[in-house]
Amino acid sequence: MTGFAHRVRRLFGTGTDSAPTVFETTPLRPEFAGEHLPGNRVWDGTHVTYLDEQARLRFRLHARDGLLHTADGALFDTTTASTLWSPDGGRAIFVMDAAGTLYSSPQHLLGRFHHSSFLAGGPVAAAGEIAARQGRVLLVSDHSTHYRPPRRFTRQVPLALRAQGIEAGDLPLEMRSQEP
């Protein structure tokens, strides 16, 4: 068994007699607690949308034929997306849950839609920005004020992508966190 196959088996289990192991997660930063409630003290006059399980499905990314696809089947492409940190475009916000599922939105709206929106303020295995063209992931960053994930969380993204059949060998990881 190759080193990669062993890591995938360790992360996701064998599918036979053992339950899959999940990715490590990090919680929402405490200063954002309650941000989804009307009248909260975090966002002056607005509140952040928190998605339930059904609503988040439209933001879920799927791997097929070695490429990432949006929930409606289109190739995932962030060319026209922009974030609060990359207003010139080309990047979208994303999170990854403990099972390695990616969610992304081209819209990042101050006080209304953030990384915390996808999993309703729950813990994430990774959070930041993602750049992709025609289904190929070009870059992943850890730029998330809501989670400020240490580097080890962002390093989980290529593992999850590879486990789903997406080539991520030389995937650039843009790290802002000073924590390992």
Image (cartoon, rainbow, N blue to C red):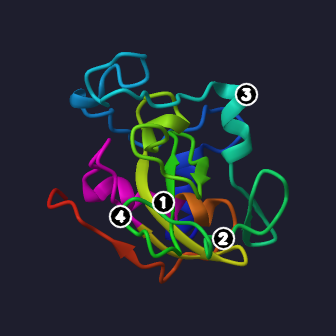
Residue that numbered label 4 is attached to: 85
Is residue 168 inside the magenta stretch?
no
Q: Residue at x 43, y 29 (%)?
A: 121
Q: Secondary structure at mark 3?
A: helix
Q: Of 124 and 83, which appears nearest the observer?
A: 83
Q: Of 70 and 166, which appears nearest the observer?
A: 70
Task: Tell me whether circle 3 and circle 1 mark residues in contact (CB < 8 Å).
Answer: no
Q: Quadrant of the C terminus?
A: bottom left
**What distance separates the C-alpha of mark 3 from that of mark 4?**
28 Å
Q: Secondary structure at mark 4?
A: loop
- The residue segment tinted magenta is 141-159
Is label 1 or label 4 in front? Answer: 4
Quarter of the rendering containing residue 40 = top left
Residue that numbered label 3 is attached to: 54
The amino acid beneath tag 1 is Val
The mark that comes first in sequence, 3 or 1, is 3
Is residue 151 inside the magenta stretch?
yes
Residue 118 locus on image (x, y percent) = 54, 38
**What distance separates the C-alpha of mark 3 from that of mark 1?**
23 Å
The amino acid beneath tag 2 is Ile
Quarter of the rendering containing residue 20 = top right
The mark that comes first in sequence, 1 or 2, is 1
Quarter of the rendering containing residue 146 = top left
Q: Quadrant of the N terminus?
A: bottom right
**What distance separates the C-alpha of mark 1 from that of mark 2?**
11 Å
The mark that comes first in sequence, 3 or 2, is 3
Is label 3 or label 2 in front? Answer: 3
Residue that numbered label 1 is attached to: 157
